[in-house]
Structures are given as structure tokens and as C-alpha cells.
Amino acid sequence: MLQQSAHTLIQEQTNNGLTGDLSLTNITNLLQFLSLSCKRGVIKLVRHPGNEEGSVYFVAEELVSAVSGNLSGIEGFADLLGWEQGTFRFLPDVGCAEKTIGLSVQHAILEAVTLLDTRANEKTMHQNTELEKRSLSMEQAGRESSEVMNSLLEVPGVDAVVVIGRDGFVIESAGSSSRVNIEELGASLAHAINGVEEMGGELNVNSFQDMFIEYGRAVIMCRPVGDAVAAIITPDASKLGVIRHKTKKLFTELGQSF
């Protein structure tokens, strides 16, 4: 069947070898037919449109080398398998100076197809990852501050979240804590942070970034969010490392609202 098909699809036999159209056959069938016929030589290919050139050298059932533009070896051969439009010309008894493949034709085809499948899967995974990132970004960009604060409450160890203005007034809060009076926390924390920022200016160590205060009954961790300050209340310092890690991106998102 393969031999009959290849005979039908080869259009012309000239003194310069066999010629044909890639739209009527494919490189795999052509190569299998010629190799099984114990032929030896090179298949020269021209891709349409673009007039890119490629070549496949073989000796009987061994694929010696392949070139497609700047690609060679199995990568070049895999690229050639995707050519659907163009022309080919088989030149018999033409040798190759450099062996870049050295596999049986069947083995080389399998390796090339596997490579193409792997690349297709990687491309699909990359596209899915980018779609997930864009979806997450759009979701986060559209969230209200209350939604972000509720996400902060889902972090293990967080009892309450408070956003405080620089004037000491509570702008927004979520959750509850019997350990700290939220309203009194606003004025006290604003006063403390103003002092910390003033000290940072005197020491020339840039602006306030992060602070946590540990008391006997509670730990307060605060961080600037936009023009305000967010504070998290947690019972103790046992989960502070996890809290700092899991809340970093949420604090950044919360800062878009203030």
C-alpha cells in the first residue's frame, strides 16, 4: 500500500532524481518508501510559502541527518514533519558529510513525533498557566477591600484585620478579637507607627515596611497598605511565619483600595 501510494504521488522522474508536491504526500511516507526500497541519497525540500529549505539524508533504512533552516538532527527532522506545502526532490547516491541522527528511519520518526508531542503539551501548559494568571489578576483587580480582608481572615491564626488611617481612625475592619479593643487600637497604633516612621527618617533607613508587637495575650502585625496601615491580630507568635508568608500578596492587593 505504501509503495503503491508513493509511486502515485511522485510526479516526475528526471535525470536529477524524483520530484513531487508535499501537498500530495508527506515526508514520512516518502522517506519510508525510499528507505524500504534500499535507496540512498538526500531529499531536498522547499516549503511554501516562504521558500524555506530543508534536507534529509539517509542510507537504506538509516536516517543519517536532517536540516531545517537553523535546526539540525532530530529537532530539524521534527520541524520538517510539519511541512504540508512545498516541493521535494530526491537525489540518489548523495552522501552527507556529518551524521547528526544515525537512527533507523522508524526510530527517528518516533523520536521526532515524541518531541513534537512534548512541545505541544508544554505549549498548552504554558498557555493554560498564562490564562490562569490573567484570570487571577482580573479577579484580584476587581475585588473589593472587604473581600480581600475576608481572604486574610482565612489565613490560619488570624483573628481580626483592621485598616487604620494615619490619623488614627479605623477605616475598615473584619473578624473579631476579645484580646484587643479595635477602636482604641486605631489611635494607639497610628501614634506608634508615626513614631517609628519618624525614627526611620532620622536613621535614614527608608520607610516603614513591617512591624509586629508581641504582648502576653496577643500579637499585632502591621504593614502599610496604600496611604493607610493594616493590622492583623493573632493570639500568639506560633503561626507568625506562616501568616507573614500567606498575607504578603493579600496586603499588596489590599493596598490598591487605600
Image (spheres, rainbow, N blue to C red):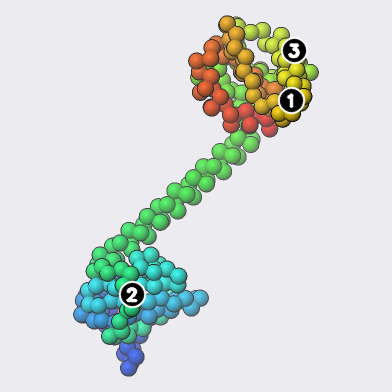
Q: Are marks 3 and 2 in contact (CB under 8 Å)?
A: no
Q: Earlier in the sequence, mark 2 or mark 1?
A: 2
| Quadrant occupied by the C terminus | top right
**Mark 2 — residue?**
98
Residue under the image location 44 percent in, 77 percent down: 53
- Disc on res. 187: 3
Towards the viewer: 25 or 27: 27
Quadrant of res 257: top right
Circle 2 SS class: loop
Give the number of the mark in front: 1 or 3: 1
**Residue 145, how many percent across, how many down?**
66, 27
* Marks 1/3: CA–CA distance: 25 Å
- Disc on res. 203: 1
Residue kind at label 2, given as amino acid type: Glu
Q: Earlier in the sequence, mark 1 or mark 3?
A: 3
Quadrant of res 86: bottom left
Residue under the image location 59 percent in, 36 percent down: 139
Circle 3 SS class: helix
**Residue 253, how many percent across, how many down?**
63, 32
Is residue 4 in view from this perspective? no
